[in-house]
Amino acid sequence: MLDLLAVERASVSSVTDPDSAWKVHVQDSLTGLEVPELRAATNVADIGSGAGFPGLVLAVALPAAQLDLIESVGRKCEFIRSAIVTGEIANAAVIHARSEEVASGPGREAYDVVTARAVGRLSTLAELASPLLRENGVLIAWKGKRDPDEEAQLGRASDGLAIQPEQILHVGPYAGSKNRHLHVIRKTGPTPPDLPRRPGVAKKRPRG
């Protein structure tokens, strides 16, 4: 996987040196295993997968789980597909779509866990994850330094998204960033009928 990243000509990641990518991408992805719900999950959706992190790493670490990597950019999907074939990662699949589109179809309330790494504000991620998650499932969001305003915005949006912040884990000593935090956010009830909104709206007009 990292060898492919090193020679990939398309812009799928700014970190391509294998030694650096091991810490920045692989070790960082593995910090998600600090969350028990992820270790026990059977169906996981990784939204905004980019170059395949954390989704591909978690698929290797969790062979009993199915990992669906949701990515809207075609060249990134092609890279992930190549990595799956090269690495013979049988329990990972690429979905070339927006997460809102997946949640409007068979992916609605289909996942035990949703993961998201560096793809938006917490309230936006919560809105995208809620319709994908089964009741009592969790969103795990990889974020950097804690932002009180962003966390407050999520708190204001939570009731309308049927989601509740539950735990914030500092995993900096093990990750590619000393400020790395994992936000664990739980689905608390049925998906509100107004979710998902149209693709892109959650980012342009986040709730809270």
Image (cartoon, rainbow, N blue to C red):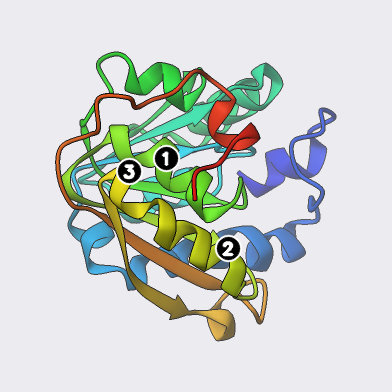
Q: Is residue 54 visible?
A: no
Residue type, label 2:
Glu
- Looking at the image, which is closer to me, 106 or 15? 106
User: Vertically, is 103 above or below 55?
Assistant: above
Rendering coords of residue 171 (x, y %): 50, 79
Tell me the number on the disc at residue 150. 2
- Residue 136 in the image, given as x and y percentages of width and height: 15, 52
Question: Looking at numbered disc 3 in the image, what kind of residue is underneath it?
Answer: Leu
- Sequence-first disc among 1 and 3: 1
Q: Are marks 1 and 3 in contact (CB under 8 Å)?
A: yes
Could you classify mark 2 by the number of other residues whose Cα lies within 10 Å: few (under 14), some (14-19), or many (20 or more)? Answer: few
Q: Which residue is mark 1?
A: 127
The answer to whether 122 is drawn above or below residue 100 in the figure is below
Q: Amino acid at mark 1?
A: Glu
Real-space Cα separation, disc 1 to disc 3, in angstroms: 6 Å
The residue under label 3 is 161
Residue drawn 48% across the image and 45% down it? 125
